[in-house]
Image (tube, rainbow, N blue to C red):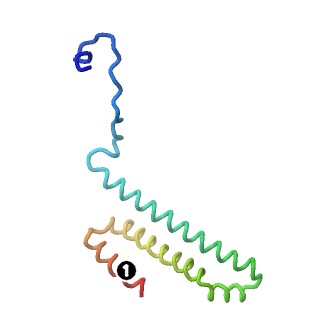
Amino acid sequence: EGELFNGEDNGLIPPIPLQAPLPPLLQHGHREQQNETKWYMIRLHYTKLSLFAAFLLIHYALRTRQQAYLALVYLSTSRLSYILLGNAIVALTVSTFQFLVNFFLNGLRPNEADTISESMRWNVTE
């Protein structure tokens, strides 16, 4: 096979490479930016999903109880509502924080991000 394709034009079609070349965005150091964008999008979708689940829970409570007071009693006594509404609040807070940091400060250094995530982990669980 090496003799057939030694640079001479003998009328044969050269073999197709098994791996396509990387797009320009993924070449030379742009992989970190791509991964960061991917994680930001995952957080954004998680926040949307959390808020949508909280909206559906509130809608369910209002439709089944048909009175605001009874719906609020259900939302304040149901374990599922505590989990879904609490998750939506935490997800919205984290997404808002990430947006504000990226918009005003152009991101954080790794040690700053680690410090904030450690303190947030313990504060949320308390």
Tell me the quarter of the picture where residue 104 sits.
Answer: bottom left
Residue at far right of view: 66
Is residue 41 rendered to the left or right of residue 49?
left
Q: Amino acid at mark 1?
A: Met
Write down the residue under mark 1.
120
Tell me the quarter of the picture where residue 23 sits.
Answer: top left
Q: Does dot 1 land on a helix, a strand or a loop?
A: helix
Picture layout, residue 41 above or below residue 31: below
Picture layout, residue 120 above or below residue 12: below
Residue at far front of view: 1
Residue 47 horizontal/vertical position (percent): 51, 68
Picture layout, residue 22 above or below residue 53: above
Is residue 105 or residue 34 the one in the foreground?
A: 34
Residue 3 horizontal/vertical position (percent): 22, 16
Residue occupying image coordinates x 35% and y 26%: 16
Q: Quadrant of the N terminus?
A: top left
Residue occupying image coordinates x 63% and y 88%: 77
Picture layout, residue 107 above or below residue 12: below
Residue occupying image coordinates x 54% and y 66%: 48
Residue at far top of view: 10
